[in-house]
Structures are given as C-alpha cells and as structure tokens.
Image: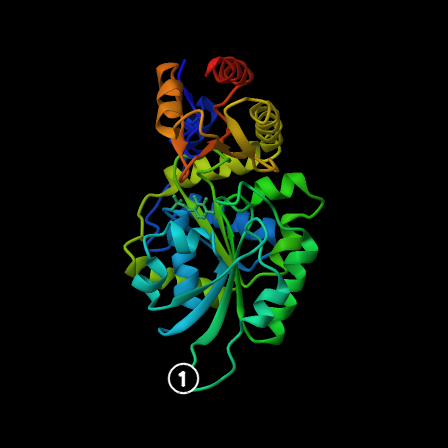
Amino acid sequence: MIIDLRSDTVTKPTKGMLDAMFSAEVGDDVFGEEPTVIALEKKVAQLFGKEAALYCPSGTMTNQIAIKVHTQPGDEVLCDTTAHIYNYEGGGISFNSGVQAKLLPGERGRISAQQVTDNINPNLDWLTHTSLVCVENTANRAGGSYYSLQQMEELASVCKQNNLKYHLDGARIFNAIVENTYTSSDIGKLFDSISVCLSKGLGAPVGSVVLGNKEFIAKSRRIRKVFGGGMRQAGYLAAAGIYALDNNIERLKEDHKRAKELGGIMSGLNYVDTVLPVDTNIIIFNLNDKIKPEDFVKKLADNSIKAVGFGKQAIRFVTHLDFTDEMLEKTVQVLKGIV
Ligand SMILES: *Cc1c(COP(=O)(O)O)cnc(C)c1O
C-alpha cells in the first residue's frame, strides 16, 4: 500500500469515472463541436450562475487566460504574497501578459478590502495602472484557509468602486464551499472571472474551467488557442469532469475530517514545532530541530508514504479521494514511530 500525501492531484480515475470517459460522445472542440465539453462548460457555468465557461488543460492556463483578458501590458495585479498565480505559475503573469504583481501580506493567504484600497495607484503617468485583484480560495500555500462570504463581498465592492477586475483562483473552491454556508452561485455573483480545477480534490485526471460573461469567454477562447490549449476530442476528459462534479463534491468533507484528525495528532508529536490551523484538506507543519526535513521525508518514504518539503522546516500533507481511513491509521502509526 503506497500512501501519497504530496498533493490532491495524485488521484487516479475510479471505475465509474473511467466508464463515463469511455462512453463519452465526442467531436472537435476547436470547431466548437465537442458535445461533452459543451455539456461540462454549461454545467459549471450554471452551477456558478455565470453566462459561459471554457474548458482548459490546467488551472495555470485558466488563471493565466483570465489575467491576459483582464489586463494590458504594464498593468499591475494585486494579490496575496503566497498567491499561486505569483509563486507557482512560472512567472506567467509577466511572461504571458507583461503585467507585474503587487504582493499584499494577507492574513493566512487572505487579503482584505482595506489592503486593496490602500494599494490602488492613482492615475498618474509614472505609476503602474492597477487593473486586477486576484484572490485564492482556498489558499494553498497558506494551508487551505478560506474566505468568508463577507470578505469576498467587501473585496468585490472595492473592485467595483475602483473599476478593477476581480478574479477568483478557485482551484479548490469546492473545499471552501463544503465548509461554509455560501454556495457556488453566491460566489458567481461577485467575480468577473473564476477558475475551478477538476483535477484537484474532485479527482478528475485533467482539466480546469474558467468562467465569466460571454464576452470574457469569447476572448478567453481566442487566448486559449494562442497559448496552445485548443483541444480536439477532449470530451473523453471532460466526461471525467462531469462525473467528478456529480459525485465528488460532498465527499470533500471526508478529506477535511481526515486532515483535521491528522493535524491534531501532528501537533502532539515531539518533533513537530507548529501546525497551521487545518481548515480544509491541507496540513502544513514545521519540524523542530530534532529532525531535518529531508530525513523526515526519507523515513516516511521507507514506510511507503510519499510527502514533500514545503520550504525550510515545513512539510505539507494533502488529503484526497485516494487517501482512505486505513491509510490514515497507518500514517498515524508511522508518524508516532518517528524519533
Ligand atoms: C493547483 C493550483 C492551480 C492550478 O494548477 P495546475 O497544476 O496548473 O492545474 C492554481 N491555483 C491553485 C491555488 C492551485 O493549488
């Protein structure tokens, strides 16, 4: 039994998902004739109450397309210091859009309306034009924390008042939704664009969707092609996305339950210094000087548990669809046996 806690992207399609994929009806999506892709796009758009959607190969692409559509070269995007769009997309905001980021030190990955207000540049020739605000919900690097509806609403109204576009990196938005009383359509009302990953906790092998109004999606379609993301009989993959949305949203709570249990146990271990609050399916903890991160990872590997370092003394575990109660039990045993 191999236990993989590196990410929630490691899941493999189940029999039910594979059956859905193999029986998908397909066509050429570049010609706009892919029935299963169209069905997926409609489904996600409806779920969030947005006019239209676009299926893409990755969440990096959906975020980068949104940034490209919303900005002009030389503009500035406001985001948290830990943002995925800034840290983990290969410098794409400058590479693809010629845009720079102003990083705001948020509270566990969450920026506030006040911070945005304080960082909008006045319209002067020598200042960068602030045009876009990006938030991440849940916030990955910050340990899976989520925004409240009120925080997202306050940011929306600052954006509206100041003519800024408002994008949600919702790679794990369903992890936030199942922990809160807000719904996908509550969220859809607030943002100009939303990126949603199907290949994280939802368990599809490939794919993300970007949502917005018709005009935004028409522009996004063109940019997807320019970025090399126009796919053909992608319905085989989109079928997995539809299956994931139908079957794997509510069960995210199980991942959260296991993550919280693991987090609770971690904080009692003598070689663990601190554990970030576990709000969803991500556990980030710091080892103390009793053990080096590489030795810790090696000891786990010797017990068939895969994990990766997350900077300095930090390690991140992510729970997911393929991490069972049996695996949780074994992981706890192994963790208690270290040092
Ligand atoms: C995973 C992730 C993405 C997209 O990643 P891809 O690997 O390109 O699909 C975007 N934002 C966040 C917060 C993520 O965790």
Classify residue 291 as left or right of residue 256: left
Q: Position of residue 242 (x, y in %)?
A: 50, 39
Classify residue 155 as left or right of residue 284: right
| Residue that sits furthest to the front in the current view | 289
CB at disc 1 and ligand 1 closer than 8 Å: no
Classify residue 86 as left or right of residue 30: right
Q: Nearer the viewer, residue 170 or 39?
A: 170
Give the vertical position of 304 relative to 85 (above or below): above
Label 1 element class = loop
Q: Residue at x 55, y 34 (%)?
A: 274
Q: Residue at x 39, y 52 (%)?
A: 87
Number of numbered discs on residues: 1
Q: Residue at x 37, y 55 (%)?
A: 32
Q: Nearer the viewer, residue 281 or 220?
A: 281
Q: Position of residue 24 (x, y in %)?
A: 41, 36
Q: Position of residue 312 (x, y in %)?
A: 40, 39
Residue 6: quarter of image:
top left
Q: Can you identify the residue that label 1 sits on?
A: 126
- At label 1, counting other C-alpha atoms closer than 10 Å, the crowd grade (few under 14, some 14-19, many 20 or more) is few
